[in-house]
Amino acid sequence: DSFPFNTWRKISKNTLVDDNKEMFAGGDPQGERSLRAAIGSYLHSARGVNVRPEQIIIGAGTEYLYGLLIQLFGNTAIYAIEDPGYAKISKIYESHGVRVRHIPMDENGIRTEVLEASASDILHLSPSHHYPTGIVTSISRRYELLGWASKSEKRYIIEDDYDSEFRLLGRPIPALQSIDVMDKVIYMNTFSKSLSSTIRISYMVLPEKLLKMFYAKLGFYSCTVSNFEQYTLARFISGGYFEKHINRMRNYYRNQRDMLLES
């Protein structure tokens, strides 16, 4: 009910009226540059993430992007995920035939000593808002995890930053990627949570070294999101409408939360 229908309808109409012939041409395999530039600008202001548009890969949902990463790292890599955690993530990895390690958590986040002993190569976590516990990974634990990743060339961290826009108490927490000086964090987010579950547009930010691997191994893939949706979302973000929508929804959810606590 809170979706900005009128604004989205207007932008969609203008996208067609402008006779943008590029919208009907073969798109960039990473996603349209205008959308990647808009996302990069938003990430800088909202999450403290500094990236070039060339590092951003657009895809139809995070599940598709997980599949790309599995192809990028190969089936021999071992993946570590949070326990408890979002069950679908484990199913996606296992459906691709890769090994998964379930790492327990404490009040500060995923336990580093168990991660070290698991012989894992890739760590998948949601440090800003863990599901289902709501735990926020502490700053000291974040540096421990970055230290774990820096010990091997093949180790990387997938930062699933879903729902990060809707922190209702305190100041926004910087992304793990924003404090990564070793280029070991793959940042990932989606518009399915912040706009609508039917808008299947997600993205990931690859470190520079992995970007070269992506071009070499997976550069033949076409983008799985239609150009029309990409151009519409690009204008929605660059025009400031996305930020206004997030602020409005944040207030709405905060009121819902306060009402629940009062009751």
Image (cartoon, rainbow, N blue to C red):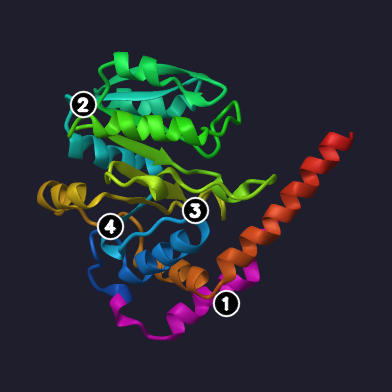
Question: Label 3 to label 4, Cα distance in Å?
Answer: 18 Å
Question: Label 1 to label 3, Cα distance in Å?
Answer: 19 Å
Q: Residue 54: where, in percent of width, then height? A: 26, 62
Residue numbers of the magenta segment: 1-22
Which mark, by number, is residue 10?
1
Label 1 with label 4: CB-CB less than 8 Å: no
Quadrant of image for the C terminus: top right
In the image, what residue occupies the spot 38% across and 67% down? 35
Question: Does dot 2 land on a helix, a strand or a loop?
Answer: loop
Relative to 82, say whether 161 is above or below. below
Q: Amino acid at mark 3?
A: Phe
In this orientation, which residue lies closer to the viewer: 138 or 79? 138
Question: Does dot 4 land on a helix, a strand or a loop?
Answer: helix
Label 1 with label 3: CB-CB less than 8 Å: no
Q: Residue 150: where, in percent of width, then height? A: 26, 34
Q: Amino acid at mark 4?
A: Gln
Question: Label 2 to label 3, Cα distance in Å?
Answer: 28 Å
Q: Residue furthest left?
A: 216
Which residue lies under the disc numbered 2?
77
